[in-house]
Image (spheres, rainbow, N blue to C red):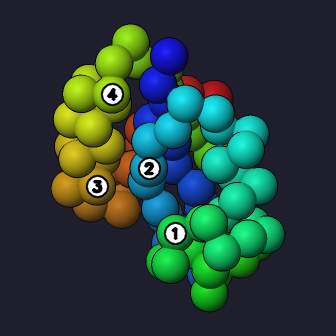
Amino acid sequence: MWQVYILKCSDGTFYTGITTDIKRRVIEHNSSTLGAKYTRGRRPVKLVYFFKVKSKSLAAKREWRIKNMAKMEKKKLIKTKK
């Protein structure tokens, strides 16, 4: 099972990614060099959204759509998941 996720960074920006292990990935973003370069300078990050999909292909497509959303659209998406 693949997951698409959005992290809220300490500077208020959002980071979107995909993974098969959401807990491990959030820990990596917060504490290791395995986290994305974008999040390393914006720690701590907080998981604010995730969505499960069946394949890596579907996850990548959803990630691309989210990355192309305006910040306000991302905020609406996050609110609908809570």
> CA–CA distance between discs 4 and 1?
18 Å
In front of the other: label 4 or label 2? 4
Report which residue position mark 4 lands on: 56
Q: Front-most of 37 and 11?
A: 37
Badge 1 vs badge 3, beta-carbon distance below 8 Å:
no
* Upstream in sequence: badge 2 or badge 1: 2
Badge 2 vs badge 3, beta-carbon distance below 8 Å:
no
x, y percent for residue 45: 69, 65
In the image, taking residue 82 as reference, residue 58 lies left or right, namely left
Q: Front-most of 12 and 22?
A: 22
Instruction: Tell me if mark 2 has few (under 14), some (14-19) or many (20+) residues whose alpha carbon lies within 10 angstroms of its own.
Output: many
- Residue 60: image quadrant is top left
In the image, taking residue 30 as reference, residue 7 lies left or right, namely left
- The amino acid sitting under disc 1 is Ala
x, y percent for residue 33: 66, 75
Report which residue position mark 3 lands on: 67
| Label 3 residue SS | helix
| Label 4 residue SS | helix
Badge 2 vs badge 1, beta-carbon distance below 8 Å:
yes
> CA–CA distance between discs 4 and 2?
11 Å
| Label 1 residue SS | loop
Q: Which residue is drawn at 31% across and 43% down?
A: 63
* Upstream in sequence: badge 2 or badge 3: 2
- The amino acid sitting under disc 3 is Lys
* Upstream in sequence: badge 1 or badge 3: 1
- Asked if residue 78 shows in the view, the reply is no
Report which residue position mark 2 lands on: 17
Instruction: Tell me if mark 1 has few (under 14), some (14-19) or many (20+) residues whose alpha carbon lies within 10 angstroms of its own.
Output: some
In front of the other: label 1 or label 3? 1
Report which residue position mark 1 lands on: 36
> CA–CA distance between discs 2 and 3?
9 Å
